[in-house]
Amino acid sequence: MSDKYIKDLEFSSVISVPRSYNKQGAPACGIYLVAPKKISFNMLTVQLRAVFSALNGSEYQKNMHAIEFQFPNKIFEKEREKASSLVAACRGAGIVSIIRGDVGLCVECGADGVMLENPEDIVTARNILGGSAIIGLDCGNSKQQAEIALQSGVDYVSFSKFLSSDKSRKNADISLLEWWNSVTHLPAVAFSKLDVEGCIKLAKSGAGFIGAGSWVWEHDEGVKQAIYWLQESIEHGLSQIKIN
C-alpha cells in the first residue's frame, strides 16, 4: 500500500458506507472507555448511567465516544442478555459500543463493532459483520501491526503504554502516534498514564481517542468527575493545536 494511498484515506472511506459515529463538527478527539470486567452487572449499569450523564451533559457531547466490553470466552444466555442490554444502553445514549475479541457476540447483541487482537481475523470479521461495522485492531506498541491493520481495512487501531511509569513494559514512543496521523485519517486510541499533562500531549499529538479504564471507574471523585477531567484536558490539548 503506497503512502499516497494511505494519506488519501478518510475516516470511514475504507468501507464507504455511512456510519452513525461520524458526527459533523465533532472535536478531533473522543473518549474510549474499557468497561471493568470484575464488577457486578447492576453496578456497571449504574456506573454507565453516570458516564452517559457526564458525556452528554456538556457541549462536548457532540463528539464521538466509545465503550469497549469484554466477556469470557465461554458465555451463556445470561451473558448474552447482559451484553444486549449494555449495547442497547450505549445506543440510547449515543455512545459507540465495541465488543472485544468476539465477532459472534457482536452479531448477537447488535454492537457497533469489534476490537480484534490478531490482524488475520480482520477480513473474516468484515465478511461476517458487513461494511457498516466498526473494526479495530489492538496494535500494542507495534508499528508493524498498525501497517498490517491499514492494509487489511480496519476503521481504527489502539496503541498502549504512552507516557507510562510502568518500567516492566516498554513504553510506546509518541512518535508512533504522530506517524499514524501522518499516513492516515483513521483514528487511533491512545492508552497512557492518565493525568492532565498526558492527556493534553496525546490530544496535541493527534490521538483520535484517549483510552481509559480503571482511572475512570475507580476515580476518587467518582466517574462523572473523571469524565469531566478527561474532557477538559482533551479540549485544552486541542485548543493548543489551534494556537500553535
Image (cartoon, rainbow, N blue to C red):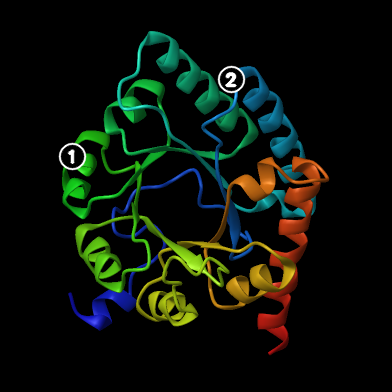
> Which kind of residue does numbered mark 1 sit on?
Asn
Q: CA distance from mark 2 to mark 1?
A: 31 Å
Viewer-nearest residue: 87 or 132: 87
Answer above or below: position of 161 versus 39: below
Disc 2 crowd, CA 10 A, few/some/many (<14, 14-19, 20+): some
Lateral position of residue 58 relative to residue 75, left or right: right
Q: Position of residue 174 (x, y in %)?
A: 49, 79
| Image quadrant where residue 110 sits | top left
Which residue is rendered at x = 31% and y = 54% of the image?
16
Viewer-nearest residue: 184 or 167: 167
Q: Looking at the rendering, in which quadrant would you find the N terminus?
A: bottom left
Residue, disc 1: 127
Q: Position of residue 132 (x, y in %)?
A: 34, 42
Q: Residue furthest front?
A: 168
Element type where label 2 sits in the image: helix
Which residue is rendered at x = 46% and y = 80% of the image?
178
Element type where label 1 sits in the image: helix
